[in-house]
């Protein structure tokens, strides 16, 4: 018997649930408790192993304080299909990065910088560091 791999949309939605849960510093146990399910079920949702139904996704959105559409931002689009009303999807590496603890920590810290000039200087610094690192190869 072959094990079916998770649907890319289910994986994406699950990773966005994980990212948002981590952004609000909520454990899988706490989210599960608020939804009346086990943390193991949350793990399966976040990995995309189990598909999240519409009503459950609405509950998750309410608990995590985001609109349901948040979970579909940057979702993969099948080849040849139209994007419809959505904006262009961000590359997968962006959402993959944001789902990591480093990506989340960097994003949270960066969002606390309110001065736009300072934020621009941070971006310039990182770009300069990358350019220097790439030049040493």
Image (cartoon, rainbow, N blue to C red):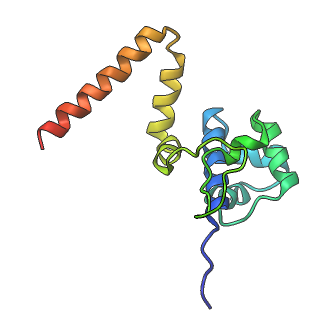
Instruction: Identify which residue is drawn at 69% across, 44% down.
Output: 86
- Left or right of 108: which side holds 33? right
Number of numbered callouts drawn: 0
Instruction: Identify which residue is drawn at 49% across, 14% down.
Output: 113
* Up-down relation of residue 66 to residue 81 (above or below): above
- Left or right of 67: which side holds 43? left
- Left or right of 131: which side holds 9? right
Front in this rendered view, residue 94 or 90:
90
Image coordinates of residue 102 in percent, x first then y, are 44, 38
* Up-down relation of residue 20 to residue 49 (above or below): above
- The quarter in which the C terminus is drawn is top left
* Up-down relation of residue 103 to residue 129 (above or below): below
- Left or right of 26: which side holds 34? right
Image coordinates of residue 125 in percent, x first then y, are 30, 21
Furthest-bottom residue in view?
A: 1
Instruction: Identify which residue is drawn at 63% across, 79% down.
Output: 4
Front in this rendered view, residue 84 or 94:
84
* Up-down relation of residue 94 to residue 106 (above or below): below
Image coordinates of residue 28 in percent, x first then y, are 68, 47
- The quarter in which the N terminus is drawn is bottom right
Instruction: Quadrant for residue 127, please give it.
Output: top left
Front in this rendered view, residue 87 or 7:
87
């Amino acid at each position: 018997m072959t094990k079916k791999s998770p649907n890319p949309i289910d994986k994406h939605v699950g990773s966005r649930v994980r990212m948002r849960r981590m952004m609000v510093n909520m454990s899988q146990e706490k989210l599960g408790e608020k939804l009346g399910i086990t943390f193991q079920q949350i793990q399966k949702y976040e990995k995309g192993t189990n598909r999240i139904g519409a009503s459950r996704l609405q509950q998750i959105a309410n608990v995590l304080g985001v609109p349901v559409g948040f979970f579909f931002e940057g979702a993969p689009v099948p080849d040849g299909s139209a994007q419809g009303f959505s904006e262009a999807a961000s590359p997968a590496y962006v959402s993959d990065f944001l789902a990591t603890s480093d990506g989340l920590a960097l994003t949270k810290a960066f969002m606390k910088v309110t001065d736009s000039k300072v934020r621009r200087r941070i971006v310039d610094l990182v770009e300069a560091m990358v350019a220097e690192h790439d030049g040493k190869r």
